[in-house]
Image: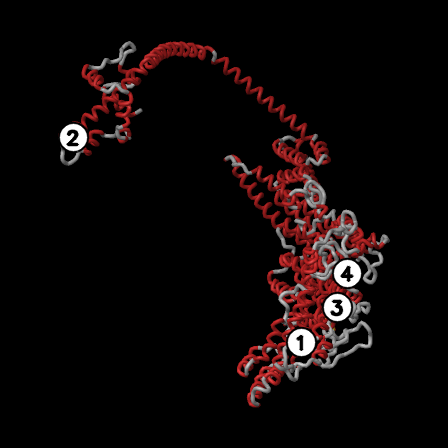
Amino acid sequence: MQKIKSLMSRQGLKSPQESVVDMSPMESFRSPSKEELRELREQPTDPLAEQELIDNIEEVYFSSDSFDMVQYELEKLPPDLNLLELEEYRDKLKRQQAAVSKRVADLILEKQPSYVKELERVTSLQTNLQLAAVICTNARRQLRSAKEGFTEASLGLLANQRRRQLLTGLLKSLRTIKTLQRTDVRLSEMLEEEDYPGAIQLCLECQKAASTFKHYNCISELNSKLQDTLEQIEEQLDVALSKTCKHFEVSHYTKVQLAYKLLGKTQTAMDQLHMHFTQAIHNTVFQVVLGYVELCAGNADTKFQKMQYKDLCTHITTDSYIPCLTDLCKALWEVMLSYHLTMQWHDEHYKEEETPPDDSSAEGSDESTVDRSYVKKKLEHGLTRIWQDVQLKVKAYLLGTDMSNFKYDDFIVVLDVISRLMQVGEEFCGSKSEVLQESIKRQSVNYFKNYHRTRLEELRMFLENETWELCPVKSNFSIAQLHEFKFMGQCRSPSVSPSRQPDSAELLELSLFEQYLPGGNPFEMQIDNKEEETEDVLASNGYESDELEKSVYQDYDSDSDVPEELKQDYVDEQTGDAPVKSVSRETLRSRKRSDYNLNRANAPILTNTTLNVIRLVGKYMQMMNILKPIAFDVIHCVSQLFDYYLYAVYTFFGRNDMHYQSASLPSQSSQPGVSRQIIPGYWYESSGLGLISSRLRTTLSRIQESLIDVEAGGESAGPHVSPEERKEKVPSPHLSQLVILTASDTLYGLAERVVATESLVFLAEQFEFLQPHLDTMMPSAKKPFLQQFYSQTVSTASELRKPIYWIVAAKAIDYEQMLLLMAGVKWDIKEIMSQHNIYVDVLLKEFEKFNQRMGDVSKIVRIPLPVSNVLWEHCIRLANRTLVEGYANVKKCSNEGRALMQLDFQQFLMKLEKLTDLRPIPDKEFVETYIKAYYLTENDMEQFIKNHREYSMKQLTNLVTVCLGSHINKKARQKLLAAIDDIDRPKR
């Protein structure tokens, strides 16, 4: 706009405002001169060209009013002036100026009607203003006349009004005095209605009024009477304040606080409130415990009322312990909830009061701020103080009774209640409840040691009575189905029962105080939970059928109550019948390849004792989940359960108790069906089979030293063990006499060995499944123990298969007979034979008989693929080592005899591969390498001796004496024998 004004001034034009001053209303717009008309005619008439000229004007011309365009253009001139260029540039500026002037002129012409109309309105306004000035002048003249005429009347009115006000004030004073005389009656009514603020307000107003009218004789005695009334109100107010400690009501507490504020004793009220809370805690717990003690005592003896609370807690009986604890926590919850609501009331109340103060109330606002600060600090400090009082009261109750003989479920309920109470404390004041944790930890350690000792003895009794028969469970059995492990699937606080879980995730995020603010109590659910859990256990216990559940709980020496359908190999869950399917050749082959089974799904192999141990682990984890401080102690005990089970399985089935005899002497038993031969002892440890790994050996030694009471077991004991250490140990278990491991027709108890070993492997798998849960519960400093337990113990469970099944493999095949038959073969033949020796057929018949017996055993218990592989591997390895041992017994042998050995072994391999799918055949190279060694030269033999230390000294010596004996001199033979002796010396 300023640019247009400037341009108009240069063009000789004026703004409408200036035109009003300079022109009369009838003056017309100035006509342009001839020169201007000529310039306007020369301007382009094309609007686009005109707009293009305007758009090409530099932005600096529109920057500000103070812009000096002449100076700007002069500064732009180049140092060397060119007249032609200057004239062109001047013409350009003229065209731009003409375009702008034309545009301005067009705008002025366009707005001229509005200008004329507005000018007419200004003229009309001027006329109206002149008329208004005349009217005002007349009004002032008339007002001056009225003022002079009414002065005396006004003064008279004012005098009468003053007299009226004095009389009204006197009447008001008389009415106030009359009201003061009737104040006592109203104050009593207000106190009965618990309207403490109103009563105090009325009393203070009466005192103020009495001081105002003290010059009247009738008011002289009223001041002292009002003071007595005020003190009486304060006493009743203190009683009302104490009631809020057990049952908080917003309206009631608001009245009490307002009353104290009127008295100016807000800080005193807060001190009194904390004293009342402390007293409420003491009185509440004492009355609860006293009620149960008197109820259990059964008489009205008053001696209990005079006891201290700590002594009173020692008289609580075992039956009433949990109900009393629950009621105690309920009562303390009410007190803490009241305190929480008290703090909440103050927070909300102070937020409403936080408004900017006026200057007139600045002093009162400062005093109110001081009171708020004092109350806030007092309430915050009181949180810790009140929670400390609660902890001390509950601690005295917890330590007043010895809980070591409590039932497990009862003790879990106690832990559950205390855990919930600690959760309340954490939400109440952020406390970690060290006092409660220490108390419950002391009781828990005491209880758990006693409980664990009893469970270990119970486990020993179960193991000694275990007949190692298969416990029938469904194929989809999982420990998560057991009630003891239900807690792992619940996303909840440890103390919340599954049946009481909130339905929405939002409710889980609420604190206990928010959840139970509308009503209820977090400790009300404990007894109900216990009943519901009992119903849950008795209903189905996580199994797929009631019959199956019954089978789990059968006595260890009887299965008479097991339904016949559960004894079948496989039962269809829909019809109850065994399925009939056409079996293809591939199916048969895969069935043989997989394992010897019961034509059923791969149900877990476990015993009643295994299930018992798993349940026990679940109970231990429940206790651990509720009480984190004793997590390490509990996990240590959990590891002992696994250790003892592993040690028992090894002791029962894995020890090599065979009496070793010479390999060349067969041992015949006088009893039918009993082992016919004794395997050379060095084959168990020195055969290179690696039956017991160093890790397993270390684990077994550690278990025996730390857990097994060898003195009680009658075994050879090391250094004398103190009674306290023996108390922590358990005698070594003994295998039940009902378990027969010497019958050859049952493959020397193979079914029992499979059930025992595979149940241990199943138990180890469950421990692997539980490792993440245990790891989260274990303190960080103790996690290496858990890692070592899993790496050194749990992972060794499957390694027990080798020593346990080796005993079966060693007795199942008559290796001694094969040695005798090989000894009768003539190996120094002169021609190549095309028929193998008879000992190969005898050995293969032994393997066929072994295969048949495994099939018979598989009808009793499923033999998993790893088990069948281990058994076949052991038998084949022993057979191959027996072949090498037989070849090593040869006194004379020719090249044709070596060829016969190869023919026998190839025949054995060909027939054996039809019996088993185990590939490659174990120790195949062991035999082939030994046979081929007969063809080595002297130098090659020396290198062979150094490289093949898996052969015994006797076997290597035979190679030197029989193979090279006739081809080398005595010195060379002695050199080779010395090399063999050097290799064997470290072993000795």
Measured along the vertical axis of the image, is residue 366 above or below residue 870?
above
> Marks 2 and 1: which is nearer the front?
1
**Tag of residue 849:** 3
Label 3 and label 2: CA atoms lie apart by: 124 Å
Q: SS class of the residue under badge 2?
A: helix
Mark 3 is on which residue type? Lys
Can you identify the residue that label 1 sits on? 883
> Marks 3 and 2: which is nearer the front?
3
**Tag of residue 859:** 4
Which circle's residue, 1 or 4, is located before the other in the chain? 4
Image x and y of residue 943, in percent:
54, 80
Image x and y of residue 487, in percent:
69, 52
Q: SS class of the residue under badge 3?
A: helix
- Label count reads 4
> Marks 1 and 4: which is nearer the front?
1
923 and 759: which is toward the camera: 923
Can residue 308 be seen? Answer: no
Can you identify the residue that label 2 sits on? 85
Which circle's residue, 3 or 2, is located before the other in the chain? 2
Measured along the vertical axis of the image, is residue 145 above or below residue 350?
above
